[in-house]
Amino acid sequence: GQNIDQPTEMTATEGAIVQINCTYQTSGFNGLFWYQQHAGEAPTFLSYNVLDGLEEKGRFSSFLSRSKGYSYLLLKELQMKDSASYLCAALDSNYQLIWGAGTKLIIKP
Amino acid sequence: TAGITQAPTSQILAAGRSMTLRCTQDMRHNAMYWYRQDLGLGLRLIHYSNTAGTTGKGEVPDGYSVSRANTDDFPLTLASAVPSQTSVYFCASSDGTSGYNEQFFGPGTRLTVL
């Protein structure tokens, strides 16, 4: 079956760095998305990786290893507004998104 | 630009009643999607539409129906609601149908079926 695994919850300190991991098992693979979702709001797009390696976008970076079925989202210089859930989603061979349950990130001052 | 809107924001519905959740986008996106989001579970695709006039079933389509009469609107209908359909429903759209494009989400409809 198809499956996305990511930690349920993480805690980090304001100003620090945090890495949120995601492993995926899908029938075929056409890329990996990360979305941010603040409590009570809609998900918003953060990144898309289809090739191995690290893609940096300001304070956020996303990494992909296709051979390991693994991705991570790296958040630097954490701010209180980064408190949110981070959703990992893999695009399968039918071009359907398979979503993880999300990682709730709690930022402490 | 409004982007993508949903109505109502929230609703309490008696079991057995029918209801239509509305979704409208003004971005002229070809693809539209309906998801439900439940605590502890990932977003689950209910139905999708790659272009006006066509629809397809997602992972959890039972009990739901959709139509796509035009590009902008993609209503989701529950014919006879059951308590297990209590959830937050998100409508989304994307420019292109390949799946590579980011999806833009509406603000959601919180539905409680009693």
Image (cartoon, coloured by chain):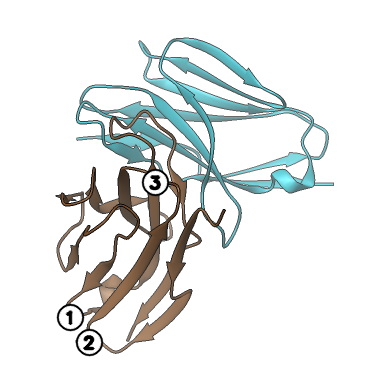
Chain colours: A cyan, B brown
Q: Mark 2 and 3 residues: CB-CB less than 8 Å, in contact?
A: no
Q: Is residue A104 above or below residue B99?
A: below
Tell which subunit mark 2 falls on.
Answer: B
Crowd around label 1: few <14 · some 14–19 · many ≥20 (10 Å): few
Report whether mark 1 lies on the same chain as mark 3. yes
Residue B80 is marked as 1
Residue of label 2 = B17
The location of residue A74, given as percent across then percent down, is: 63, 26
* Residue pointed to by mark 3: B28
Q: Residue at x 30, y 36 (%)?
A: A3
Quadrant where the image shows the C terminus of chain B: bottom left
Q: Is residue B111 above or below residue A74?
A: below
Instruction: State the separation of the CA atoms marked 2 and 3.
Output: 32 Å
- Say if mark 1 contacts mark 2, CB within 8 Å: yes
Place of residue A48 in the rendered image (x, y in percent of width and height, measured from the top left): 47, 26
Q: Amino acid at mark 1?
A: Ser
Q: Amino acid at mark 2?
A: Arg
The alpha-carbon separation of the residues under discs 1 and 3 comes to: 31 Å
Asked if residue B113 lies left or right of residue B26, the reply is left
